[in-house]
Every structure is written in C-alpha cells, then in structure tokens.
Image (cartoon, helix red, strand yellow):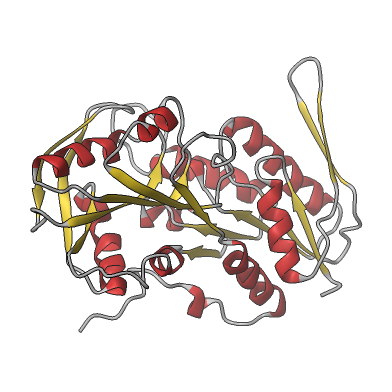
Amino acid sequence: MREIVVFSGSAHPDLAESICSYLGVKLSPTTITRFSNGCLQVQLNENCRETDVFIIQPLVPPVHEHLMELLQMLDAARGASASRVTAVIPYYGYARSDKKAAPRISIAGRLTADLLVTAGANRVLTMTLHAPQVHGFFSVPVDHLEALDILAGYFRDRDLSNTVVVSPDFGRAKDAAYFARLLGVPVAAGNKQRISDTEVVIDTIVGDVDGKDAIVLDEEIATGGSVLTLLDKLGERGVERKSVVCTHGLFTGSAPERFSARSDVTEIVTTDTVSAYRDNGIPNLHVLSVASLLGEAMRRIHVGESVSSLFAGPEWATTS
C-alpha cells in the first residue's frame, strides 16, 4: 500500500492513528499554524504527487476551525497533484441542517458539501448521517457507513428476553427497527417535538415498553435533551433498567453531568467517531472503535474493490 497517503487534522488524531494501524501505513505529518489574526494555515508534510490521499477529519466542535482545516488540507492535496483526494468525515456536523425549516435560512448541510467538493474532495467517506438526503447533497461519490452492527455486537451475548429498543422519535425508527432486528427484540418509538436546540417534548411512546428493559438508540447525543426526556418518559412507564446507545457521542454543554447523575442508566455505549469521550467524566461510558470499519472501506476504495458489503444498516436491510 505504498501509493496511499493518510493525513489528519486536529479534530481526532487518535482515530486517524488507529485507522493507519489497521491499514499498515504511517499517518503522514501535518503542520497547522494559527496566526495572531485568527487565520489558519495548513501544510501537508508528505509528497502527494500521483498518490491516493485520504484526509481524516470529523466536523466536531469547534466545527468551523476543523472545517477550515479540512478545506485547506483538501486544497493543499489537490495543489500537490494528488491523483485522488478522499475526505474521511466520520462525523458530518452540518448533517442536521438538511432542509429549510424556517424562512431565509441556509441549508448548511448542502453548502458544506459544496465547499468540500470545491476545495478538492473527489470522494467522501462518512458515517451515520442525520438524514439520508444529505448523501445527495454531494456531487462526488459518497460512501455512507453505519455503526449499528458494531453497536449491536456489544449486546449480543446477553439475555435480552425482556428488552425493547426505543427510538426517541419516528425519524430514527427505521434505524431502531434494524437494530432491534439484529438483537431479536421488539421496537418502540417516542412521539417527539423539538422546541429548541436543548428542549424537546415527548408526549407518548408508541410500543410496548411497560416493565421492560430499554435500549435507547439515537444516532447522536449532543446536549442529550431528546434522550434524557425519553428516559423520564420510560420511567413513567415502569422501565427501570435503561441502556443508552449512539454512534456520535458528543456530550456537549452540561450533558456529561446530566448523564452522570442518572442512576437509572446502567450504561452508555458509543463509538469513537468523535473524540468527546476523552475526559468527559461519564463513569459508565463504553466506547467501541470504528477504525477497522473505516480502514477497510479506505482499503477497498484504494484498491478498487466493492464497498457495498460494508453498508450494513436499515437502508440496505432485506425485509421478509
């Protein structure tokens, strides 16, 4: 694999190192300079000419600094005559901005996609987008992976005879149904209304949850408003044992303290798509790695093999 070159921004170098370990290549060095006027400069310290370049950078807080790093790295690789440049974005932060929800606002998910392609991305590899339509915002090929099989593997050896998978809203019910099918358990969903970025209302839960153990599944936890509201609602329905599962565990603001204070949450399971799990103080947090999944997708992209067999998730599941 001498023709592959991997770079990382400052968003999550640990994940980049793990991916490179899977691939058996070194992580090439990058110099990021922040000037006194607030501007950034990125230099790729490895020859890129006629190579297959992969740039790993989740769009995590501070999102705009990490986005600008990624845009400059893409531009630098293109300017250095790379044969192909793939943006590996384990967490696509602007995926929530996928529609015009109010007058005179930007669909920032599409705008960000345009910026990445303009900067030099020939291909995008990402994981668990907030909405499927974000895939279509890109004018270059996109490989959209899911972590549901990895997350389900954490629970497979348990007695789940009295367990139900619960989605905070109907928008993620398809993911929850696929996850429940992997575990062989029933599924339920909350009827959620979002009031603001930090406030939601769940007025009812559709499905049989009374007296069962619950696995609450969401694709992302930032402030935790949706999940915490659902936990309270489940408590009203006699659910005592609750596990929380997500792909992107951001835990922003007071989320670590709020989850740490929940004695009814037996565990929180997430992946390392973002780096917020480090030093967040949540005592019952378990982090599963997606490095081998992303690394295998990168290997197949590099050698021209099919990536479709890695697309485990509700969009690719067969129904009986």
Q: Is residue 234 visible?
A: yes
In this view, the residue in front, 209 or 44, is 209
Q: What residue sits 23% from the left and 50% below the top? A: 241
Q: Is residue 55 visible?
A: no
In this view, the residue in front, 255 or 90, is 255
Q: Quadrant of residue 251?
A: top left
From the top left corner, tell me how far across and down residue 154 is, in percent: 42, 65
From the top left corner, tell me how far across and down residue 64 is, in percent: 60, 31
Number of dots carrying numbers: 0
Q: What residue sits 35% from the left and 26% below the top? A: 104
Above-or-below relation of 108 to 77: above
Return the residue found at the far top.
Answer: 37
Q: Quadrant of residue 275?
A: top right
Task: Please state, as top left, top right, bottom left or bottom right, where the N terminus lies in the image.
Answer: bottom right
**In the image, is 12 to the left or to the right of 318?**
right
Task: Please state, as top left, top right, bottom left or bottom right, where the C terminus lies in the image.
Answer: bottom left
Above-or-below relation of 49 to 193: below
Q: What residue sits 33% from the left and 48% below the top? A: 266
In this view, the residue in front, 31 or 80, is 31
From the top left corner, tell me how far across and down residue 43 is, in percent: 85, 41
In this view, the residue in front, 85 or 208, is 208
From the top left corner, tell me how far across and down residue 305 is, in percent: 63, 82
